[in-house]
């Protein structure tokens, strides 16, 4: 479970440009919850995700993950628990390494398995099988450099890799923003399937309101650093596009 209490982040403190990006924010998320996070540009969504992942430090407040206070943990200490997918498909993987090598790195991040994997054929077989499930034909390109794949292919692989490291929490910041419509649908479906199958808690930021309606089992809206709406699965089901548009 994720528990956030009075989380606060200001930028340019004490100057004329001071801004409270995340403002005494509170919320909890339960295991397996797939939260859609919406809000206008500048409402604090990415800052919130950065605070949770630890690549920004909070000014004050508490972030608990499965009961552990992680707000003081360094980013690399949190990365074992928290998977991240960004808007830019170029983030999150090493472009010069092959698909297989990238998976190996992701696998090493998960606990102490390093001794068991090596470079053997077993690992290759296992990864190949996982990738085959994406139905993108990428299992035939295991030795191809990550940087030579399309954005949609990379994003799907990055997602698979993140889940492979068995995170407690998955944070996705506009993961489909750079993808064409078909790849977007593929990635959203894959995201939903992986979250369900692995019972991961996930927060996905999107400006695509149709996706916001279709996916996830809870929806939050941020405005000026605060959560101003929080709909559970039932209320979300009753939400329609017109109503959602009227939130903005
Ligand atoms: N590193 C920074 N330095 C100064 N101000 C920042 C920094 N990062 C974010 N901000 C400011 O904090 C506010 C929240 O930004 P944030 O990126 O979290 O918004 P967002 O909801 O993700 O917006 P978008 O939908 O455009 O991605 C904005 O006013 C932004 O200008
Ligand atoms: Mg953002």
Image: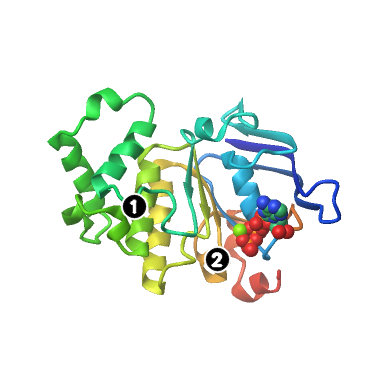
Disc 1 is placed on an element classified as: loop
Residue 84, given in percent of the width and then of the height, sits at: 48, 47
User: Could you say which is closer to the camera, residue 90 or residue 212?
Assistant: 90
Does residue 124 lie above or below 155 as drawn?
above
Picture quadrant where residue 197 is located: top left
What residue is drawn where x is 23% and y is 44%? 127
Ligand 2 resides in the quarter of the picture at bottom right
Question: Under tag 2, what secondary structure?
Answer: helix
Q: Residue furthest left?
A: 121
Disc 1 packing (10 Å; few <14; some 14–19; many ≥20): some
- Give residue 110's position: percent from left, percent from top: 38, 31
- The answer to which quarter of the image holds residue 7 is top right
Q: CA distance from mark 1 to mark 2?
A: 33 Å
Q: Is residue 211 left or right of residue 231?
A: left
Of labels 1 and 2, earlier in sequence is 1
Which part of the image, by quadrant, shows the N terminus? top right
Tell me what residue is drawn at x 49 percent, y 36 percent: 79
Residue 221 visible in the shown view: no
Q: Which quadrant of the view contains residue 233?
A: bottom right
Circle 1 or circle 2, nearest the eye = 1
* Residue underneath mark 2: 213
The mark found on residue 146 in the picture is none
């Amino acid at each position: 479970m994720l528990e956030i209490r009075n989380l606060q982040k200001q930028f340019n403190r004490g100057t004329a440009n001071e801004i409270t990006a995340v403002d005494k924010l509170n919320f909890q998320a339960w295991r397996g919850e797939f939260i859609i996070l919406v809000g206008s540009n500048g409402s604090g969504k990415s800052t919130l995700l950065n605070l949770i992942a630890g690549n920004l430090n909070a000014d004050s407040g508490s972030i608990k993950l499965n009961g552990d206070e992680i707000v003081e943990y360094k980013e690399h200490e949190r990365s074992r628990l928290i998977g991240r997918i960004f808007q830019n498909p170029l983030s999150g993987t090493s472009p010069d390494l092959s698909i297989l090598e990238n998976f190996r790195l992701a696998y090493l991040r998960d606990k102490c398995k390093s001794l068991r994997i090596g470079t053997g054929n077993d690992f290759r077989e296992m990864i190949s099988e996982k990738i085959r499930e994406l139905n993108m034909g990428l299992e035939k390109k295991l030795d191809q450099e990550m940087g030579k794949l399309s954005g949609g292919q990379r994003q799907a692989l990055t997602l698979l890799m993140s889940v492979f490291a068995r995170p407690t929490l998955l944070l996705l910041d506009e993961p489909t923003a750079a993808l064409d419509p078909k790849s977007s649908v593929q990635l959203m479906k894959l995201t939903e399937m992986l979250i369900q199958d692995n019972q991961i808690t996930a927060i996905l930021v999107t400006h695509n309101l149709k996706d916001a309606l279709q996916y996830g089992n809870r929806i939050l809206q941020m405005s000026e650093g605060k959560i101003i709406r929080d709909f559970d699965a039932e209320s979300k089901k009753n939400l329609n596009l017109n109503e959602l548009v009227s939130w903005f």
